Image (cartoon, coloured by chain):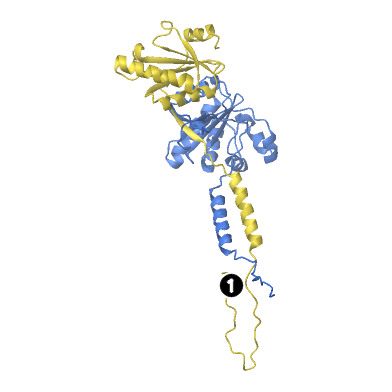
Chain colours: A yellow, B blue
Amino acid sequence: MAELDTSSGGGKKGGKVRSKKASTRVDLTAMVDLAFLLITFFMFTTTLSKPKAMDVTMPDKDDQNKDQLAVAASRSMTLLLGANDKVEWFVGEPGKTPPETTGYGKEGLRKVLIENGEKIQQTTGKYMTVLIKPSDKSNYKNVVDALDEMKITGVQSFAIVDITPAELGLLKRDGNY
Amino acid sequence: MPRVKVARKSTSIDMTAMCDVAFLLLTFFILTAKPRTEDPVPVDIPASSVEQPIPDDNTLLLTVGQNKVFFGVDGNDIRKQTLIQMGEKYKINFTPEEQTKFAALPTFGVPINQLKGFLALEPTQRKEFKQPGIPRDTTNNNELSDWIREARKVDVALHNKALRIAIKGDSKEEYPVIGQLITLLQKQKINKFNFITSLRAAPKTTK
């Protein structure tokens, strides 16, 4: 207890001056009120959910160095990020396989990635390589969503690559640009 | 009949323990609180399932919104030295007073020739001021890439650490701006950087 023993120890007799016993008990209610008020304030102002950092690694873009690893068309999948949160995908080279349009999220891109990943794993015995090609009409959220799907579906090799005019044409034809 | 006597009890409670706890919590919250840096433009960061927290220091933050890029780097000493080196490069002499003011700025987005005027403003006026963003283009030497390069040099010189680059973009931001930034970073041989995201509210799981 926040009290101190203030009894002056001496006897009552002997005509000694007796010091008055004042209670040292302080009323803490106001102090506690204030403390909790401040706690509430700090709790509301601190950001509990800290922003997260997504690692992005770009392929080395060296103008001089041209020897880059070629990936077999049969196990490469291309994602074309178009306008209005639409994504077109095809496996192999552009133009040879008709692209399909899908959306982002669980029912769209994720399903496609998992299905094709398994298919490619079975037919070639190797993992799938995904090329993400954002068009000028796609927004930043689409890129982050696509990268996030890579992480969720466990695609091991993927890269953000510039889109080619032929692929832009595909997007335009399907009304996703 | 004798009346039932209700034992009278004191209503005053011992608040010492409660007070102790309250102040303990208060201390905790005060110490963990980090002043929130105001973004010069409203930035709504996209959500993802990444759970890796953003590093606390040694980060260069590029805020992208409304087609503008803003530059911010951690550490007052780094900011100050970066300004001095940029001043040398662009032949602008910043006074020590301006350097101190600049060191206190967490993020900014004005061309370097307007920087003196921007620093002369009062802090309240500075908030109102519409910052045009740091000039950038596709050439090798634009202002933004100079800022990034100088900041990286300073970080190596002062702390002997490689600066981490993080991009904080608005989710509605169109890709070309981000693409430009990526090309700009790649020209400096930065192939690894971070996108800042928030945690998705309800993590979706594959069925």
Q: Residue A173 placed where, x, y %?
A: 53, 6
Query: Is residue B18 visible to us here?
Result: yes
Residue B65 image-quadrant placement: top right
Q: Quadrant of the C terminus of chain B?
A: top left
Q: Is residue A39 above or below residue B206?
A: below
Q: Which residue is mark 1?
A: A3
Q: Residue B129 placed where, x, y %?
A: 68, 33
Query: Is residue A68 visible to us here?
Result: no
**Residue projecting furthest to the left:** A125
Q: Is residue B147 above or below residue A92?
A: below
**Residue projecting furthest to the bottom:** A14
> Could you tell me which residue is drawn at 41 percent across and 7 percent down?
A97
In the image, A171 versus B4, the foreground residue is B4
Residue type pointed to by label 1: Glu
> Could you tell me which residue is drawn at 56 percent across and 60 percent down?
B20
Q: Is residue B183 above or below residue B160?
A: above
Q: Residue A151 placed where, x, y %?
A: 42, 27
Q: Residue B170 placed where, x, y %?
A: 57, 27
